[in-house]
Image (spheres, rainbow, N blue to C red):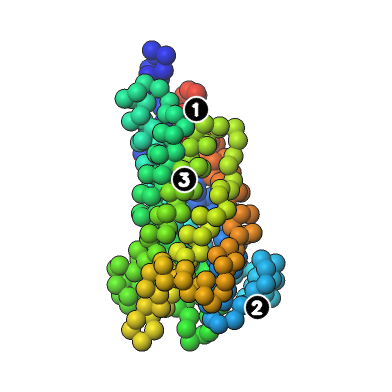
């Protein structure tokens, strides 16, 4: 129950907001997964010694020609798992923060407060979803490797089992720091802006920091073990090697597909979320006014 203008009304339970938040992200991922694959391939281009792709269109044409149209959905199971963990956690935590703020201050949070809550929710969600992120990056990048170097994970469950068996549990959180940094920046703007302007969708964010961190995160999670030693020692090592071997512009590899993916994914996620909220309000709560997750 929530108190609105002195009158109690039924609201969507917190656990359902977790469920609907994760489900909305999973549905959106089914639509934009090909753009995520193109983004990852662009960011990984050059790690084998030569630049494999000239542009996003070049990635798309080569993937379709050499691997077939279904390969655009390589790693979909890991992508869905990422949404089931990352999005469920961040949306759930953000809603708990909103409920706490409204209960204690009896008002909606300010923009600064909303941004702060978005940072916390994004960081927590990224930590929770990092294992799926590692599996996703590896599965989407596998076909570009030489046959003898491919991991050939069957699905996300197989990836988790083999990563833990061959590389240890800690590998599931490889690249966690840049992943968390990116998520904090993204959610600071994404969740706060949606809370304040529900009728407008913020599709993409700052071009610099999120993509900068994203590129570093992708390299770390994909890296191989050579002669018993990790290919990179950490985020700084990745950044230094990329700058030295590929130049500063390499930090923005995959920007176009990232931008094209991020916008629709945000819009679709919130559209699906609103429709699920409306359906729950209508069919479960008896057509009471929508009480959105954000």
**Is residue 193 or residue 73 the one in the foreground?**
193
Residue ID for mark 1: 290
Q: Is residue 210 left or right of residue 103?
A: right
Residue 214 in view in this figure: yes
Mark drawn on residue 66 = 2
Which labelled disc corresponds to residue 6? none
Residue 133 screen position, x and y as percent = 44, 61
Residue drawn at the location 54% of the way across and 77% of the way down = 245
What secondary structure is marked by label 3? helix
Marks 3 and 1, Cα distance to the nearest angstrom? 23 Å
Q: Against 269, is 248 above or below?
A: below
For marks 2 and 1 on the same chain, the one whose residue lies earlier in the sequence:
2
Measured along the vertical axis of the image, is residue 274 above or below residue 87? above
Q: Which residue is mark 3?
A: 187
For label 3, count other residues whose C-alpha is less than 10 Å away and answer few (under 14), some (14-19) or many (20+).
many
Q: Position of residue 249 (x, y in %)?
A: 60, 66
């Amino acid at each position: 129950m929530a108190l609105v203008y002195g009158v109690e009304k039924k609201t969507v339970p917190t656990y359902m907001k977790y469920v609907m938040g994760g489900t909305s992200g999973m549905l959106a991922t089914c639509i934009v997964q090909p753009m995520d694959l193109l983004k990852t391939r662009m960011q990984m281009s050059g790690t084998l010694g030569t630049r494999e792709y000239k542009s996003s269109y070049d990635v798309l044409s080569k993937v379709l020609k050499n691997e077939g149209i279904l390969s655009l959905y390589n790693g979909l199971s890991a992508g869905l798992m990422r949404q089931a963990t990352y999005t469920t956690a961040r949306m759930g935590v953000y809603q708990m923060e909103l409920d706490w703020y409204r209960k204690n201050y009896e008002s909606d949070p300010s923009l600064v407060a909303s941004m702060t809550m978005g940072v916390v929710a994004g960081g927590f969600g990224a930590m929770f979803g990092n294992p799926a992120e590692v599996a996703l990056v590896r599965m989407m990048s596998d076909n570009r490797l030489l046959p003898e170097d491919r991991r050939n994970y069957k699905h996300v469950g197989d990836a988790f089992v083999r990563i833990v068996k061959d590389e240890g549990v800690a590998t599931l959180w490889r690249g966690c720091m840049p992943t968390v940094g990116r998520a904090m920046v993204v959610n600071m703007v994404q969740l706060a802006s949606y809370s304040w302007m529900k009728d407008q969708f913020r599709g993409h964010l700052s071009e610099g920091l999120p993509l900068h961190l994203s590129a570093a995160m992708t390299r770390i999670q994909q890296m191989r073990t050579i002669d018993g030693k990790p290919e990179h020692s950490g985020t700084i090592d990745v950044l230094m090697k990329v700058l030295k071997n590929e130049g500063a512009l390499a930090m923005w590899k995959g920007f176009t597909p990232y931008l094209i993916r991020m916008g629709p994914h945000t819009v679709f996620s919130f559209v699906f979320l609103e429709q699920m909220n409306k359906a729950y309000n209508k069919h479960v709560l008896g057509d009471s006014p929508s009480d959105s997750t954000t």
